[in-house]
Amino acid sequence: MYVIDEDTIQPSCDFCEFPCQNCEKNATDCEECYPGWLYYDVDRICYEEIIWYFPFLGGVVVVFLFVFVVDCYKRSTNFLHSALYFLCWLEDAVLGYLLYMWYIGEVDGDRSLTIISLGVEVILNLTFMAVHCKLMIGKGSLEYTQLYQNYRYSSYCISTIAYLINFKMSIMLISHFAGRPRFSGTLNRDGWQKFNIFALLYIGLVYLPFTADFYLYFTTFGLRQLTSFIAAEACVIRTIICLILMLEILSQCACAGVGEIDLAMRAQLDKRKKKGGAGKRKARRSGMANEE
């Protein structure tokens, strides 16, 4: 390599700093890298070649195939609810890996948005615990309340996991997964409204800040670090989860179809019409109706 003074360029016998195989101005100004490392001429730095097989996205494929097979075996299975439960496990796994990478110093830069999103998610889980116990169980539908009476262990186990890790996992109790009675609860209208509020808060306060932080990280480091691959998987998994949540919100929204109250009112109206029509026919037959 060479040492550059103000007026002259003098050769130097200093060694290049690994992983630079050949360098120019200083020990880290790389011109060539050792095998297993990639050279980026813009930064003149060697980056380790990354071989990553996207295991978490592979897990997403396995989840959908597994739930699809169960759905074919038991048609009562709610596909989206069941898939959402298992996707939440993958979401927590990939986030745990990212936290481990941050702990060992593999995550560079200021990641304030990600930290804020994780903090908000913890607050959402704890708040959901209070709302779920007080309102969704205590004032829920009869079918939902009976789950905690007839299947106490599984119901409270899933609820505890949802409170501590991911509130969306509570959807398993109404998934009808594999036709099992312990997963065959139903949420009433108020219960769905509360769950959908938490879903919207998750999308706005957790998903969007995390995705924005990933965009900033990717524009800075690209795919030159392993963290970029893992964070990309996390964004894809969370995007799929948010799409499922939006589908659930639209399915429960009054503008997406006729609500239960509207159906009841229409049913009562139809009964009145039928009764009124029957009364008129009886009156005509008895000769009591006014002839027009």
Image (cartoon, rainbow, N blue to C red):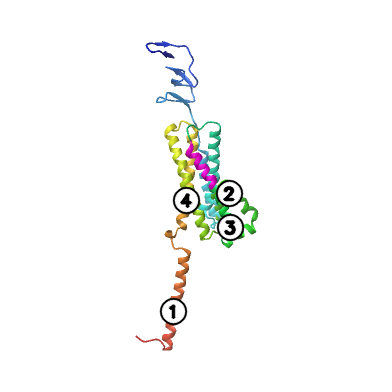
Residue found 46% across the figure and 74% down from its top? 271
Question: On residue 137, which mark appears?
Answer: 3
Q: Report crowding for label 3: few under 14, some 14 to 19, many 20 or more residues within 10 A (C-alpha).
A: some
Q: Earlier in the sequence, mark 3 or mark 1?
A: 3
Tell me if I can see residue 212 in this picture: yes
Q: Quadrant of the N terminus?
A: top left
Q: Is residue 74 above or below residue 110?
A: below
Residue found 48% across the figure and 37% down from its top? 112
Q: Earlier in the sequence, mark 4 or mark 1?
A: 4
Q: Nearer the viewer, residue 290 or 7?
A: 7
Residue found 56% across the figure and 35% down from its top? 100
Amino acid type of the residue tagged 1 in the rendering = Gly
Q: Closer to us: mark 2 or mark 1?
A: 2
Q: Nearer the viewer, residue 111 or 175?
A: 111
Mark 2–mark 4 contact, CB under 8 Å? no
Amino acid type of the residue tagged 2 in the rendering = Tyr
Question: On residue 200, which mark appears?
Answer: 4
Residue 99, picture quadrant: top right
Q: Which residue is mark 1?
A: 276
